[in-house]
Image (cartoon, grey):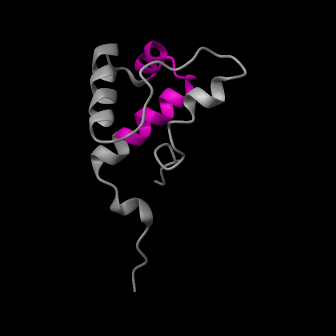
Amino acid sequence: MVERLPCLDLTLADVERKHILATLRGCDGNRTRAARVLDISIRCLRNKLREYRKGGLRIPEQLAPRTPKKAKASAALSEEDVAPLCF
């Protein structure tokens, strides 16, 4: 019997969303830097984030700058949304 891996149930859109959100988190919420890392325009990134918000994902409009309170600002990105992908 073939064992199914959980990552095989992901669509391409799911993989893209998880990668974008993980990159955004890795850039401490800095959208300009995340767009550069992703090699997409800031406009494209903003549109993707707006689309995710409309789909019900909680993403703050502006993440707080890097301070001790940063953890609260980025907490809206759930671990499930930015969990590492398996390949």
Out of 12 and 28, give the one closest to the viewer.
28
Q: Position of residue 13 (x, y in %)?
A: 28, 44
Q: Position of residue 21 (x, y in %)?
A: 45, 34
Image position of 78 (left or right of 7): right
Q: Position of residue 84 (x, y in %)?
A: 52, 47
Q: Position of residue 40 (x, y in %)?
A: 33, 20
Which segment did they paint magenta? 17-37
Give the quadrant of the N terminus: bottom left
Q: Look at the picture and state if 47 lies above or below 13.
A: above
- Residue at horizontal 41%, vertical 59%? 7
Out of 71 and 41, give the one closest to the viewer.
71
Taking the magenta stretch, the answer to whether it contains residue 2 is no
Taking the magenta stretch, the answer to whether it contains residue 27 is yes
Out of 19 and 3, give the one closest to the viewer.
19
- Residue at horizontal 65%, vertical 16%? 66
- Residue at horizontal 57%, vertical 35%? 75
- Residue at horizontal 28%, vertical 20%? 44
Out of 45 and 37, give the one closest to the viewer.
45
